[in-house]
Image (cartoon, grey):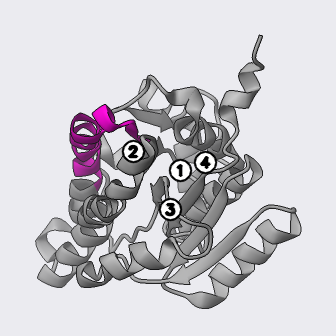
Amino acid sequence: MANVLDRFRLDGHVALVTGAGSGIGRAIGEALAQAGAAVVLCGRRAAPLAEAQAVIAASGARAASVAGDVGDRGALAALAGAAAKPFGTVDIVVHAAGLNHRQHADDVTDAAWDEQIEVMLSAPFFLTRHLVAGMKAKGWGRVLNIASLQSYRAFVNGSAYGAAKGGIVQLTRHMAEAWSPHGINCNAIAPGFFPTALTAPVYADPQRTRALASQTAIGRNGALEDLHGAAVFLCSPASDYVTGQTLPVDGGFTAK
C-alpha cells in the first residue's frame, strides 16, 4: 500500500512564489521547498530574495530568485519566462504579493486603488494565464491564491484591499472552472493575523494585537509556520480532488 505521506511530496515540481522576499510568501516558499519542490522566489527587491534563497539552499533544498513587479502587467510574460529558466516549466504558482495603503473610503486615491487591485487581483489572473500552457502540457498544475479575513468582512480603512481580497475568492472559483478540467487545481488560503510587513501597524499596538487574538477560537494570532501545512496540501497531489475553494487559516477567527 502506498504511503499517504508521499502524496504531500512535491519532488519534481517547480513552484513560482510571488511576494517571496518576506512574510507569507517567504513562509510558503520555504514550506514548498522543504516538501521537495524547486522554488523560484519573486519580488521587487533583490536583497530579501537573496536572503530567502540562501536560507532555502542552506537546508539542502533548491531555490532561485527572479526580481519583478507583478503590478506591471506588461512585464508578466517576461516574468513567467524567466521563472521557467532555472528549473524548467512552472507547474505551481503562489500569488502572495500584496500591499495595503490603509486609506479611509473618503480618501482613497485613484493610484492607490489601481495599484492594490492590480497587484492582488489582476496579477494572479494574468500571470497564471501566462503559465497555464505549460501546466496543460503536463496535465497537472496548482494555483494558490492568498485571500484574507477581508475577503469576508470589512476592516477599517480597507476599501481597496478588501475589494481585491473579496475578488480573489471569486476569481479562484472561476480559475477552477476554467482550468481544473486540464488537471490544474486552483485554491486559496485566507490567513488570519500573522506578523508580516503589511500587519506591522497592527502589531505595533499591543492592545489591538491582544484584542484580535481574543477574537480567534484558538486564542492567539498566527505564526508563519501555521501556513506551512495548508500550503503544502493545496500545492500537492494530496489535494487532487480539491479545487475552487478558499481555506481560512485564521485560528477560528471567522468561526466565532
- Disc 1 is placed on an element classified as loop
* Cα distance in 3D space between marks 3 and 1: 33 Å
Residue at left 31%, top 52%?
155
Question: N-terminal of the two: label 4 or label 1?
Answer: 1
Label 2, on which residue? 149
Question: N-terminal of the two: label 3 or label 2?
Answer: 3
Determine the image quadrant of residue 61: bottom right
Q: Is residue 197 above or below residue 246?
A: below
Label 1, on which residue? 193
Question: N-terminal of the two: label 3 or label 4?
Answer: 3
At label 1, counting other C-alpha atoms closer than 10 Å, the crowd grade (few under 14, some 14-19, many 20 or more) is: many
Q: Nearer the viewer, mark 2 or mark 4?
A: 2
- The dominant secondary structure in magenta is helix
Q: Verify whether residue 182 appears in magenta.
A: yes
Tell me, for residue 210, which label it has, or none.
4
Q: Nearer the viewer, mark 4 or mark 1?
A: 1
Q: Please give the range of residues in magenta.
A: 165-189
Residue at left 65%, top 82%?
48
Q: Locate the N terminus by quadrant.
A: top right
User: Are dots 2 and 4 in contact, CB under 8 Å?
Assistant: no
User: Are dots 1 and 2 in contact, CB under 8 Å?
Assistant: yes
* Cα distance in 3D space between marks 4 and 1: 11 Å
* Cα distance in 3D space between marks 2 and 4: 17 Å
Question: N-terminal of the two: label 1 or label 2?
Answer: 2
Q: Position of residue 7 (x, y in %)?
A: 66, 29
Q: Amino acid at mark 2?
A: Leu
Q: Position of residue 233 (x, y in %)?
A: 59, 35
